[in-house]
Amino acid sequence: MSRYSIFVIAFFSFFSCNKCYQSFTPGQLWFDNNGVHINAHGGGILEFNGAYYWFGEHKIEGDAGNKAQIGVHCYSSTDLYNWKDEGIALSVVDDSTSLIVKGCIIERPKVIYNASTNKFVMWFHHELKGKGYSAAMTGLAIGDKVTGPYRYVKSVNPNAGVWPQNYNPQTADTSIVNPYKRKDPQWREYVEGGVYLRRDFNKGQMARDMTLFVDDDGTAYHIHSSENNQTLHVAQLTDDYLDFSGKYSRVLSGESNEAPAIFKRKGQYYMISSGCTGWSPNPARSAVAPHPLGPWKALGNPCKGSEEQVSTTFHSQSTYVLPVPGKEDAFIYMGDRWMPENAIDGSYVWLPIEFEDDQPVMNWQDEWSY
Ligand code: GAL
């Protein structure tokens, strides 16, 4: 057989087989069932009826790919290695009067299933077209079928007119109004004191990088970077997951956490997050709490390896943590290796999370399986 025919056979068997992958290869191109690099950035996974559904930002080529030109892409899998393209779950529209007009920003979409309403609920970080990142809203869309289509409902700055449960407005120093000067020695104190929280009290709080977490009792939480990205808010959703219940708390205030991902292990809640450096990677953080609403305690950088690996989270930024089904104590870190100059080229860094002395730990793997 000629070298050419071996290549042709290998090529076709690779793209026609049902089970091509038997392992993860972090940071490499990852082809779907059509042989196309998976396009679901800043994503999350819903397990439903024995299958996994991966929702993420659909990117296009070039810098324009950093804005929503298409919408939220969905893939399905039964083994987490091989993914089938299920198409666009939420589409942006051409109508300039709609808030999800093409060219707005839709990031970090997450979908959860509400058993009592039998609806699939998607929340995502939403920025309005032409307004940069200033709207800092969270958007809601609902689906009757897991793969969609999802109907856009609304975007909000959450918890307007409600104080977090761990903040006392009576004792707050209200003399500082807008200190946005990091060099100010008291800046951290002002943030912790709630200067941005109070500023946004009436109109609703900022919500940028976000994730969703559903607890074993079905209570869902929306976790987002708030207060000028300085403080995370963990906010309980209503029973139907379509609104904010008004119960929320501030987490790690003044510590600039982004890219939150939450999971539960042995009755404790863990969070992996990043610092705040845009598309460039930075050292990951971890934290633990006895309840999603806190109190959260910082545990430090979970990454082990060379200085470069540790300081860049293996060139990635967290987006989700997936418990490995049917396995005790096994979790998958899902991160994005962003390529903002050609957004569609962004790749995925999935790594095992292990535990040492009840602290999450991540090591680099060229290739691994669970
Ligand atoms: C990152 C954030 C991404 C995206 C980016 C834009 O910090 O995690 O989701 O918003 O900034 O610069």
Image (cartoon, helix red, strand yellow):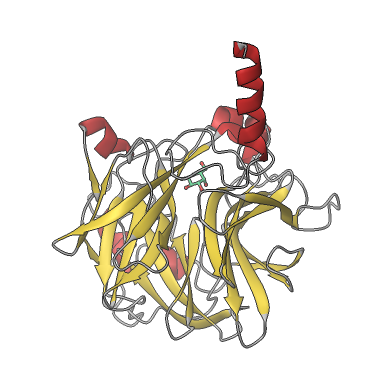
Q: In terms of image quadrants, where is residue 253? A: bottom left
- Residue 273, by quadrant, is bottom left
Image: 370 above or below 58:
below
- Point out residue 238 in the picture as x, y percentages from the top left corner: 56, 84
Residue 174 visible? The answer is no
Q: Residue at x 32, y 37 (%)?
A: 312
Nearest the viewer among 221 and 44 is: 44
**In the picture, residue 144 is in which quadrant?**
bottom right
For image coordinates 57% across by 27% down, the residue present is 341
Residue at image position (38%, 35%) is 315
Please name the residue shown 56% across and 69% down the image: 50
Question: What quarter of the picture does the N terminus occupy?
Answer: top right
Label count reads 0
Of 325 and 149, the residue lying toward us:
325
Measured as percent of width and height from the top left, residue 140 is found at: 66, 68
Locate residue 337 relative to residue 313 in the image: left or right: right
The residue lying toward the viewer, choosing from 6 and 14, is 6
State left or right for residue 131 relative to residue 352.
Answer: right
Residue furthest out toward the left: 357
In the displayed structure image, the side of residue 102 where residue 135 appears, left or right: left
The image shows residue 280 at horizontal and vertical percentages of 42, 35
Q: Residue furthest right?
A: 95
Name the foreground residue: 217 vs 295.
Answer: 217
Locate residue 75, reporting x and y percent.
64, 53
The residue lying furthest to the front in this view is 1
Q: Is residue 20 visible?
A: yes
